[in-house]
Amino acid sequence: MMNEHIRIGKQYPEITQLLLYSFGLQDQEFVVVYEMENLQQFSDLVAELRSSEGRLYTVRDTPLHTCIYRPPEETLALFR
């Protein structure tokens, strides 16, 4: 099942994935972070992953947060 996820993910080389173990963060096993420029590509990736065999064993798939990266200087300037 993980091989299927890897295969699907490799079809989207412009999307970077970071997988973290979430020991101590409620009861999820992993925190998954994706970085991309095109939100539609991410939506396509998520739709494809949700139709994979491994999805049958997913109990909970929340939360999903979306944000825009800004360098720290730009972020601080937003509050001035």
Image: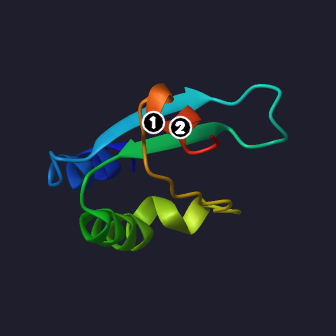
- Which residue is found at the position 83% from the left and 27% from the top? 24
Q: Where is residue 40 in the image (x, y as percent from the top left)?
A: 28, 71
Looking at the image, the residue that sits furthest to the front is 80
In the displayed structure image, the side of residue 10 where residue 48 appears, left or right = right
- Residue at numbered disc 1: 74
Q: Where is residue 53 in the image (x, y as percent from the top left)?
A: 42, 65
How many numbered circles does the render carry? Answer: 2
Q: Is residue 24 above or below residue 10?
A: above
In the displayed structure image, the side of residue 63 where residue 47 appears, left or right = left
The quarter in which the C terminus is drawn is top right
Most foreground residue, 9 or 64? 64
- Which residue is found at the position 45% from the left and 36% from the top? 74
Disc 1 to disc 2, how far (Cα)?
5 Å
Identify the disc placed on residue 77. 2
Q: Is residue 17 above or below residue 36?
A: above
Q: Position of residue 13 (x, y in %)?
A: 15, 45
Q: Which of the 4 image quadrants contains residue 51? A: bottom left
In the displayed structure image, the side of residue 42 where residue 53 appears, left or right = right
Quick one: SS at disc 1? helix
Quick one: SS at disc 2? helix
Q: Which of the 4 image quadrants contains residue 47? A: bottom left
In the displayed structure image, the side of residue 6 where residue 29 appears, left or right = right
Most foreground residue, 31 or 50? 31
C-beta proximity under 8 Å, tags 1 and 2: yes
Q: How crowded is mark 2: few (under 14 residues within 10 Å), some or many (20 or more)?
A: few
- Which residue is found at the position 33% from the left and 51% from the top? 5
Render colour scheme: rainbow
Q: In this view, does 24 lie above or below 46?
A: above
Q: Residues within 10 Å of mark 1 (few under 14, many from 20)?
A: few
Callout 2, which amino acid?
Ala
Q: Position of residue 1 (x, y in %)?
A: 39, 50
Callout 1, which amino acid?
Glu
